[in-house]
Image (cartoon, rainbow, N blue to C red):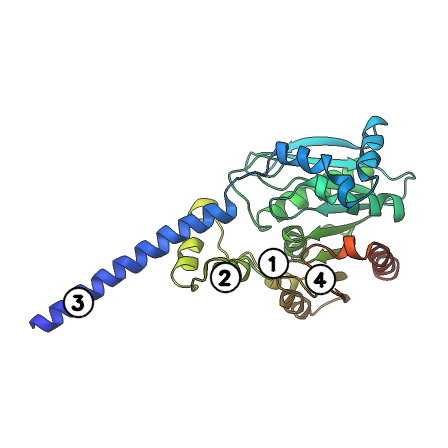
Amino acid sequence: MKKGAKIFLWVLGVLAVLVLALGLGGGAYMVEYGLGPHDIGPEKQARDRAKLNESYPLLEEWLDSLEANGIMQDTTVIDDEGFKINSYYASADENVGKTAVIVHGWTSNPAQMMMIARMFRDSLGYNIMVPSLNCHAMSEGDGIQMGWKDRLDVEQWMGIAHEIFQDTLQVVHGISMGAATTMMVSGDELPEYVRGFIEDCGYSSVWDQFKKELKGQFGLPTFPILNGANFVCRCKFGWGFKEASSVKQLAKCDKPMLFIHGDNDDFVLTENVYRNYDAKVNGYRQMWITAGCKHARSYADYPDEYVATVRTFLAEHVE
């Protein structure tokens, strides 16, 4: 072999090692940054609960009253991977046979979903089930699962809610990662009593969301870091970023779904809702773009319109 060819192969080999090291090293950091168990435990939930009234007047008092009267309770079960997972639940004032399973977002917790819980229970007359996702609040786990494995826990909570309330109808409502979880649930084979879905500002896939963060926060290209992160995630958690896709699951969903997204969302970009909406080709679909809203602010900015939109969707297409 000529000297020039040897030098070329040597340089190529060095570059390959550098790319591999960058991909795996950067990918491992990205997985830890995005999926690692940071400040998302019970202490954070307690802090968030103490601040409920700052955003939603009288919400903390509402929750305290339900707990004091034994209406709001919580339960812990074991999921398929052996982790203890926790959920809050409360019955409606009347035995109506309708339940809303309400799913929180990334690094969030049930306390931050109590405005939606109050909407369903007090305004719409639903029983409520509000779980903590894997590795959040009171639920165990070895990392955030971005909705993909979470969907299996949510499906477990659906069955538990059905046993507790003896309901005949369930709807799943999620915000942000909870919305992605909701869409990922929608493509699975589900019991007949699961009748509809509401997703509020969910991403189209974990790959797309991490790609956006990689570029937006760090100014880095997709290759090789996102590829490395995808590999690390698959080795650590058993799933890949492209597999965890709302779009792919929505293509299998034939039950009604309401899509909500703010037109000023710079975290989960508004373009996601159009991809998600277009992916749902079977069954009823409805989209509401909220003017001027940033990420997960649609209810806070338009509470009356939010309740009215959900009420109409449920009454006309789910109940």
Q: CA distance from mark 4 to mark 2?
A: 20 Å
Specify the quadrant of the image occupied by residue 133.
Answer: top right
First in sequence: mark 4 or mark 3? 3
Q: Is residue 305 above or below residue 108?
A: below
Residue 139: image location, x then y, percent: 61, 35
Q: Amino acid at mark 2?
A: Lys
| Secondary structure found at label 2 | helix
Q: Amino acid at mark 4?
A: His
- Name the residue tied to disc 2: 211
The reply to whether the C-beta atoms of the residues labelled 4 and 3 are less than 8 Å apart is no
- Name the residue tied to disc 1: 267
Residue furthest right as drawn:
94
Specify the quadrant of the image occupied by residue 129.
Answer: top right
Residue 307: image location, x then y, percent: 85, 54
Q: Amino acid at mark 3?
A: Leu
Mark 4 or 3: the one toward you = 4
In the depicted view, which residue is nearer to us: 114 or 76?
A: 114
Can the viewer see residue 1 in this picture?
Answer: no
Residue at image x 89%, y 48%?
123
Q: CA distance from mark 3 to mark 1?
A: 43 Å
Q: CA distance from mark 1 to mark 4?
A: 11 Å
Residue 120: image location, x then y, percent: 83, 47
Residue 15: image location, x then y, percent: 25, 63
Mark 1 or 4: the one toward you = 1
- Name the residue tied to disc 3: 9
Residue at image x 76%, y 42%?
54
